[in-house]
Image (cartoon, grey):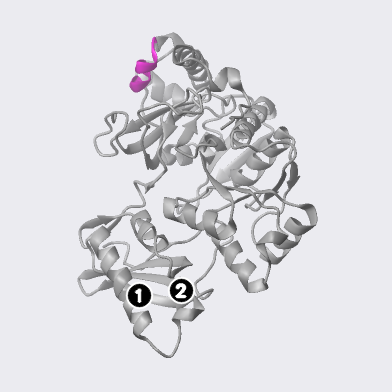
């Protein structure tokens, strides 16, 4: 296999040089951070008053963690490290509190960000000969404009189609010969279902690759998309607080997410003890951004669960790889005292050929106990006068789920296309339990 490198001098930098680069950039980031009201106080309390107080990368552990709540409390300008007049763009993501987490970019920040995204895209084998259709939400969400700028830097023809309106998406694909798309995995599954519904032949399209991100999904879901659409699907990882897309990406080997360590310092911690986890172990990802001057963030608790591969990638890149993100520490469901991650349920469902592309998890109170219901779509052939195949499939799903999560769920089978479809991040869990329970 022949590999493509967008920035070979950085992507293949020897580890000792890479770590020296990180330390130099970390000190620069700390110097900028000390200009912000939040970090002046937080770093001062930790005894860090100048960049040289960090003598090695290990000293980063002296820096307190930053959380999403910290960012909200610093809204709107508490984390801004440059004059407001030098800021050329902001992005924001809102949460359940209604207070957004906002990040800011200088012109240099935007150039560095697009460069990291270009590195991701080019590393999957894409070139300026490709036509890129960006089927993701634009606006304050970082995914749309982030991928757009990176693809333009590679030199691809970019179609900013945005999310939704599958009929229009198909027309654009056919008219302009789209070869690469970017979308959420749930929307890619929806696209395949709509292709069948609208009678669109796969050989009428030139698609060959897709970038999937913005929501956790299982390896079985990736394989299903690849088989149904006959394309290569690459995992993407990013988050608004760290610019957005371009933090980590799969190379052509598709065996782990290369974290770009010249732009980020990553740690894996136990989310309960907050102590480091050894390479190969799983825990919560903590990130420090080194490639943004407008709004530096140190030791940010992402809540995303992953780990480092212990061995290097055969592609020759020296940057460490992350395991697939399996979920978030704050996404864990506690059902009758049992810890359950939605990704565990998805892995069971998507491994079954009889099951459709859409599902929904509901949790309700049944007296003093929690009741878990898993709703999933199945093909039209299953819904017929003879109910025995339907009942057999329900029992198979129930039994397999119980073996995986140790909870006996209710299973509902629905006709294809009957469950709600989201054009953005898929809503997979509906928790109807009272909030004080």
Determine contact: label 2, label 1, CB under 8 Å: yes
Q: Which residue is nearer to you in this view: 424 or 396?
A: 396
Task: Please tell me whether residue 372 is drawn above or below residue 115 in the rendered image.
Answer: below
Task: Please tell me whether residue 304 is drawn above or below residue 312 in the rendered image.
Answer: below
Q: Is residue 364 visible?
A: no
Q: Residue 405 placed where, x, y %?
A: 26, 59
Q: Which residue is nearer to you in this view: 156 or 312?
A: 312
Q: Secondary structure at mark 1?
A: helix
Q: Which residues are magenta?
A: 55-62
Q: Is residue 56 magenta?
A: yes
Q: Label 2 belongs to which residue?
A: 378
Q: Secondary structure at mark 2?
A: strand
Q: Is residue 164 magenta?
A: no
Q: Residue 344 placed where, x, y %?
A: 34, 56
Q: Which mark is residue 393?
A: 1
The quarter in which the C terminus is drawn is: bottom left
Q: Residue 406 placed where, x, y %?
A: 22, 61
Residue at 61%, 34% (x, y): give it: 117
């Amino acid at each position: 296999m022949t590999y493509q490198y967008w920035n070979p001098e950085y992507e293949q930098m020897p580890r000792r040089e890479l770590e020296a680069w990180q330390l130099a950039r970390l000190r620069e980031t700390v110097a900028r951070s000390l200009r912000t009201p939040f970090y002046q106080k937080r770093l001062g309390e930790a005894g860090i008053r100048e960049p040289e107080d960090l003598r090695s990368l290990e000293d980063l552990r002296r820096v307190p963690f930053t959380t999403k709540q910290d960012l909200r409390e610093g809204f709107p300008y508490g984390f801004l490290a440059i004059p407001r007049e030098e800021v050329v763009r902001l992005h924001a993501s809102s949460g359940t509190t209604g207070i957004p987490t906002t990040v800011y970019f200088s012109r240099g920040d935007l150039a560095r960000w697009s460069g990291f995204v270009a590195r991701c895209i080019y590393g999957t084998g894409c070139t300026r000969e490709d036509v890129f259709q960006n089927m993701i939400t634009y606006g304050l969400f970082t995914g749309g404009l982030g991928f757009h700028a990176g693809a333009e830097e590679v030199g691809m023809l970019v179609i900013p189609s945005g999310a939704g309106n599958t009929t229009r998406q198909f027309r654009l694909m056919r008219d302009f010969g789209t070869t690469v798309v970017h979308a959420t995995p749930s929307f890619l599954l929806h696209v395949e279902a709509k292709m069948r519904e609208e009678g669109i032949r796969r050989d009428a399209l030139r698609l060959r690759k897709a970038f999937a991100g913005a929501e956790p999904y299982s390896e079985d879901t990736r394989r299903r998309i690849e088989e149904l659409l006959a394309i290569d699907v690459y995992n993407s990882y990013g988050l608004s607080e760290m610019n957005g897309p371009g933090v980590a990406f799969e190379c052509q080997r598709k065996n782990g997410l290369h974290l770009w360590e010249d732009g980020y310092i990553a740690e894996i911690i136990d989310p309960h003890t907050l102590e480091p986890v050894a390479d190969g172990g799983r825990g919560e990802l903590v990130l420090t951004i080194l490639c943004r001057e407008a709004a530096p963030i140190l030791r940010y608790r992402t809540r995303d669960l992953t780990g480092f591969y212990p061995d290097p990638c055969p592609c020759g890149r020296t940057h460490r790889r992350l395991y697939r993100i399996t979920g978030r520490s704050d996404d864990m469901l506690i059902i009758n005292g049992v810890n359950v991650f939605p990704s565990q349920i998805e892995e069971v469902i998507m491994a079954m050929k009889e099951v459709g592309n859409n599902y929904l998890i509901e949790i309700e109170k049944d007296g003093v106990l929690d009741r878990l219901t898993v709703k999933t779509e199945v093909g039209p052939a299953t819904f017929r006068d003879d109910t025995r195949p339907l009942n057999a499939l329900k029992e198979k799903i129930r039994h397999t789920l119980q073996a995986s999560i140790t909870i006996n769920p209710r299973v509902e089978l629905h006709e294809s296309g009957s469950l709600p479809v989201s054009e953005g991040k898929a809503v997979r869990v509906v928790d109807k339990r009272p909030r004080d329970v």
